[in-house]
Amino acid sequence: MPVSYLSKKLSPYVRVAAIIVVAALMVFAGLRFYSWRSYGARTRLTTLVNPWNPVSETGFSARLVEAENGMRVDRSCAEPLRRMLADCRAAGRNPVLAAAYRSVDEQLVLHDERFQQLVDEGRSPEEAEAETSKLIAAAGRSEHELGLAVDIVDEGYRATDARQAETPTVQWLEENAWKYGFIQRYPPDTEDITGFGWHPWHYRYVGEGIAESIHSLGITLEEYLSLFYSDEAQVVYDGS
Ligand SMILES: [Zn+2]
């Protein structure tokens, strides 16, 4: 048989390498297939907004419904958010929905308040702008304007800083949010890709299948889009 003849001729190393290559190709093809399957959903749910992709260029218009605390979200994620918060509470944690949809004007106020605070503390306008933009997106460039992003903090510690990652609520979210279609949008050490520093409290809805892929691959939305939708004109991240 040619096959057994071939396998005898190949060294074990070559065979192992071939198996790894084939397995990697199968995983890639599987994810690619999954992406095609979810094509209908991606046009809205994977809408990319970051410092280089303003909301105005996405053509996205939020369809807002009520969530908790008088806040609103896009209706696509209202039910998954409700389930996620309920299950988080059932697990003994105390999540507080601290932010959801923001209009462009609300984003402008938030950004300017932080900027002014830093200027008042003695920073130059350039320094203040650079520091503010790492934490709070400029108006027109925040995912919160899509209604697909939420900030969730722990009732016992409400500050939006790195220590939020140590709270029981955010630790539960880190493990479980993907099951509800949410991803931690700004993980540590991804500022060059996402444009923002680590925001352990900021979660973005992308839908269950895509959230699972992004979570299991340990990548950002920008990297996911450039891996699977390189034809998307709106993706500017080039992998460098
Ligand atoms: Zn946020």
Image (cartoon, grey):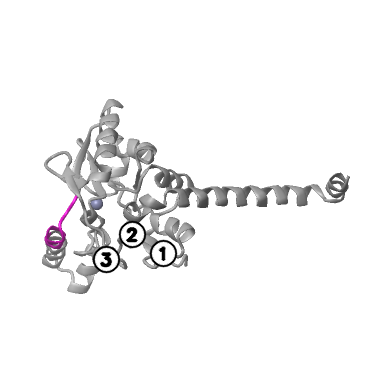
Q: Residue at x 29, y 48 (%)?
A: 162
Q: Position of residue 222 (x, y in %)?
A: 40, 59
The CA distance from mark 1 to mark 2 is 10 Å
Magenta-drawn stretch contains 107: yes
Relative to 175, is 143 on the left or the right?
A: left
Vertically, is 213 above or below 155?
A: below
Relative to 203, is 37 on the left or the right?
A: right
Kind of residue at badge 2: Leu
Kindly tell me whether mark 2's CB lies below 8 Å from ligand 1. no
- First in sequence, mark 2 or 3: give its number: 2
Vertically, is 157 above or below 53?
A: above
Q: Position of residue 165 (x, y in %)?
A: 32, 43
Q: Position of residue 73 (x, y in %)?
A: 20, 46
Foreground mark, 1 or 2? Answer: 1
The residue beneath circle 2 is 48
Kind of residue at badge 3: Pro
Q: Tell me where the magenta segment starts and ends, as one range.
A: 101-109
Rendered image quadrant of residue 55: bottom left
Vertically, is 59 above or below 3?
A: below
The residue beneath circle 3 is 54
The CA distance from mark 3 to mark 1 is 15 Å
| Element type at mark 1 | loop
The answer to whether residue 99 of the structure is visible from this angle is: no
The CA distance from mark 2 to mark 3 is 8 Å
The residue beneath circle 1 is 232
In the rendered structure, find residue 136 and report the number of the disc placed on it.
none
Kind of residue at badge 1: Glu
Q: Residue at x 26, y 59 (%)?
A: 60
Q: Residue at x 19, y 51 (%)?
A: 101
Neighbour tally class for label 2: few under 14, some 14-19, many 20 plus, Cα within 10 Å:
many
